[in-house]
Amino acid sequence: MSSQFDAELNEVRARLLEMGGKVELMIADSVKSLVERDSALAERTICTDAGINQMEIEIDRKCLHILARRQPAARDLRFVALALKIVTDLERIGDQCVSIARHAIELNREPQLKPYIDLPRMADAAGNAVREALDAFVRGDAATAVRVCREDRIVDELNEQLQRELLTFMMEDTATVERAMRITAISKFLERVADHATNIAEMVVFMVDGKDIRHSIA
Amino acid sequence: MSSQFDAELNEVRARLLEMGGKVELMIADSVKSLVERDSALAERTICTDAGINQMEIEIDRKCLHILARRQPAARDLRFVALALKIVTDLERIGDQCVSIARHAIELNREPQLKPYIDLPRMADAAGNAVREALDAFVRGDAATAVRVCREDRIVDELNEQLQRELLTFMMEDTATVERAMRITAISKFLERVADHATNIAEMVVFMVDGKDIRHSIA
């Protein structure tokens, strides 16, 4: 294997980690903009997304270039094929964060319905899952990837708990409906972010072991 | 190019179309199970998803095999790389349909809140978008793909209209909140299905022209 080829794979690895870091910050900032009622931060988070979209296009190009010129085999091939899939997940997490930030801006215009306790916990867990899934990918670490898949239920449970709580608000007082609906939407977006991390982690197990655990871990 | 290689590409094409057909049926059936209050159909739709998941794994394998053994170049390479991405979108559409079917089962236990007019229209539009995006993919037809991207706003608008209508229901009568929330969720799932179709279509334009229109069509 040529050192030029190694350098190209490392470049994909580095760019994916960089993109993951930016996405992780978007997750934290979109929820922080709600908790701290900082709509300027929400606006900045929305603007960040253009850079994420650009990174998706660039990483795709690099991967196609490697497939065309280097004809990678076995594990290297699986690495590049999965990089193509993972970059799509990261890009879509960026989209979820934009949606969260948009709802935050609207919620920040109104009196706060309730203290935001669970949303920051969900954002933390989802951001950690993204980072760990990507780390597992670049290190080829299946054990970490399996753990990310298992921990997805933490975010799922927080989401379900929050959905029930908000339903009670709405049923007790119709004046809360619009705000509660927005908080519900944010909670679901965070649940989807964690799902993307799980998708990445499942694919990593496949890359490392050549074994497909998608659709088999509960 | 060997005829064996052609046969392998055609096999991926055929399997993707088959998977797309199954997913299209899941979209129609999940909403039909609500409109016709047919929870047995909803259960069958949920069961279909296991087959979709299996197809994802098989198509991924075929694509990796082609990349490893055939070293495709230029347009063939872009075809295989995008097949890897598209199969993920199709699999996730299957997941959305399962979620729709689960909400349908719960809604079918309760008196019907309102006539379902917009949801079947959204399901039709989303199903058509999936079929057209896949047709554009297998035929390498950029014009159709661009049209699919543009038509996404039809589903977006129906979704927004329905969200507003359901909000009014909830604000007028708290007894409607639980059912309205479920219908809201179904509407959002259909909007995401259409988004997946748009994602596929955007990638098709890239495959055909080598031009990336992702993040540039409003």
Image (cartoon, coloured by chain):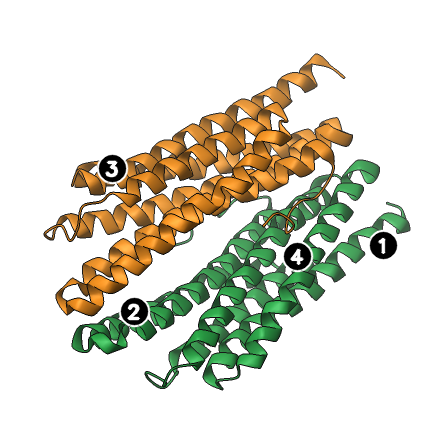
Chain colours: A green, B orange
- Give, as a three-letter code, the residue at label 1: Ala
Q: Residues within 10 Å of mark 1 (few under 14, many from 20)?
A: few
* Residue A204, image x, y percentages: 59, 53
Q: Quadrant of residue B209?
A: top right
> Are labels 1 and 4 on one chain?
yes
Residue B16 location in percent, x, y? Answer: 52, 29
Q: Is the C-beta separation of discs 1 and 2 under 8 Å?
A: no
What chain is tagged by disc 1? A
Compare residues A96 and A212 and report the one nearer the observer: A96
The image's mark for residue B132 is none
User: In the figure, A169 relative to B56: above or below?
Assistant: below
Mark closer to the observer (1, 4): 4
Write down the residue under mark 2.
Answer: A163
Quadrant in which residue B81 is drawn: top right
Q: Is residue A50 visible?
A: yes
Q: Identify the chain of the residue marked 4, using the numbered disc in the image.
A: A
Name the residue carrying label 1: A7
Mark 1 or mark 2, which has the lower sequence index?
1
Same chain under badges 2 and 4? The reply is: yes
Instruction: Give how far across and how far down residue B198 sits, in percent.
Output: 53, 43
Above-or-below relation of B113 to A100: above
SS for dot 3? helix
Q: Which residue is mark 3?
A: B32
Q: Which residue is mark 4?
A: A53
- At label 3, the amino acid type is Lys
Q: Amino acid at mark 4?
A: Asn
In the image, are marks 3 and 1 on the same chain? no
Q: Chain of mark 3?
A: B
Residue drawn at the location 71% of the way across and 28% of the way down: B76
Three-letter amino acid code at the position of disc 2: Gln
